[in-house]
Image (spheres, rainbow, N blue to C red):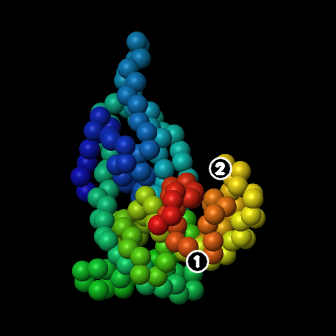
């Protein structure tokens, strides 16, 4: 495990603090007029998603967790687990719901995702910025109801409900932002 000092922190870096994995969301070096300098951080627990603020002394040694990124294909769902296949070794991996997060709303069988792993454990699943999904059901747009920017709810093939423009129909493919869960455009 590489040991670094708090002076080397960067946003997105993952730390192993007392056996727990934390991702640095934000950090700030503070040099008060009196006393010693310190580093104020906002950390996100990689396993539970909870966020905490923690202050370190400047130059304090912390353990950096080396995260392995593997591109994998989503095969199917088995109970509460999601089964992925490594694109290179064809090894299958069962991933629990906690590590998958909100990904079930955006992935379908055959899609590719980036799995972040630490010591063989899947910590997080990263999705592309946008995905293309089919509209499973939406009400037809009412003729003459063409108010600029008007939207209606549409249920996608994954069960996610998004607001879409009135002209879209059931069966069309749309592009959805995975960060906000909002409609981007037709695919």
Occupied quadrant, residue 142: bottom right
Question: Residue 37 is drawn in which quadrant?
Answer: top left
* Residue displayed at 61% across by 66% down: 168
User: What numbered label is drawn on residue 123?
Assistant: none
Say whether residue 159 is visible. Answer: no
Q: Secondary structure at mark 2?
A: loop
Residue 6 placement, left or right of 45: left
34 left or right of 65 in image: right
Residue 67 in sight in this render = yes
Q: Compute the Cα span from label 1 to label 2.
A: 21 Å
Q: Nearer the viewer, residue 118 or 129?
A: 129
The numbered dot on residue 171 is: 1
Residue found at x 40% / y 31%? 28
**Vertical arrangement, residue 98 with respect to residue 144, above or below:** below
The picture places residue 66, in percent across and down from the top left corner, at: 29, 58
Residue at the spot 46% in from the left edge and 77% down from the top edge = 95
Give the residue number, with chain letter if any, for mark 2.
149
Where is residue 51? Give x, y as percent: 54, 48
Who is closer to the viewer here, 27 or 156?
156
Residue 145 placement (x, y as % from top left):
75, 57
Q: Residue at x 43, y 58 (%)?
A: 129
Label 1 CA crowd tier, 10 Å (few <14, some 14–19, many 20+): some
């Amino acid at each position: 495990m590489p040991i670094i000092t708090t002076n080397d922190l960067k946003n997105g870096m993952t730390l192993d603090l007392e056996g727990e994995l934390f991702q640095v969301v934000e950090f700030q070096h503070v040099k008060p007029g009196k006393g010693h300098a310190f580093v104020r951080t906002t950390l996100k627990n990689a396993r539970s998603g909870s966020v905490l603020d923690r202050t370190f002394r400047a130059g304090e040694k912390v353990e950096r967790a080396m995260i392995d990124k593997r591109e994998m294909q989503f095969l199917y769902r088995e109970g509460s687990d999601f089964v992925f296949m490594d694109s290179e070794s064809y090894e299958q991996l069962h991933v629990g719901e906690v590590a998958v997060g909100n990904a079930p709303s955006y992935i379908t069988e055959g899609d590719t995702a980036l799995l972040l792993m630490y010591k063989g454990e899947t910590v997080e699943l990263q999705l592309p910025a946008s995905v293309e999904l089919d509209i499973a059901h939406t009400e037809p747009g009412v003729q003459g109801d063409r108010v600029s920017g008007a939207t209606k709810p549409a249920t996608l093939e994954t069960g996610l409900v998004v607001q879409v423009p009135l002209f879209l129909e059931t069966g069309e493919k749309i592009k959805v932002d995975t960060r906000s869960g909002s409609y981007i455009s037709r695919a």
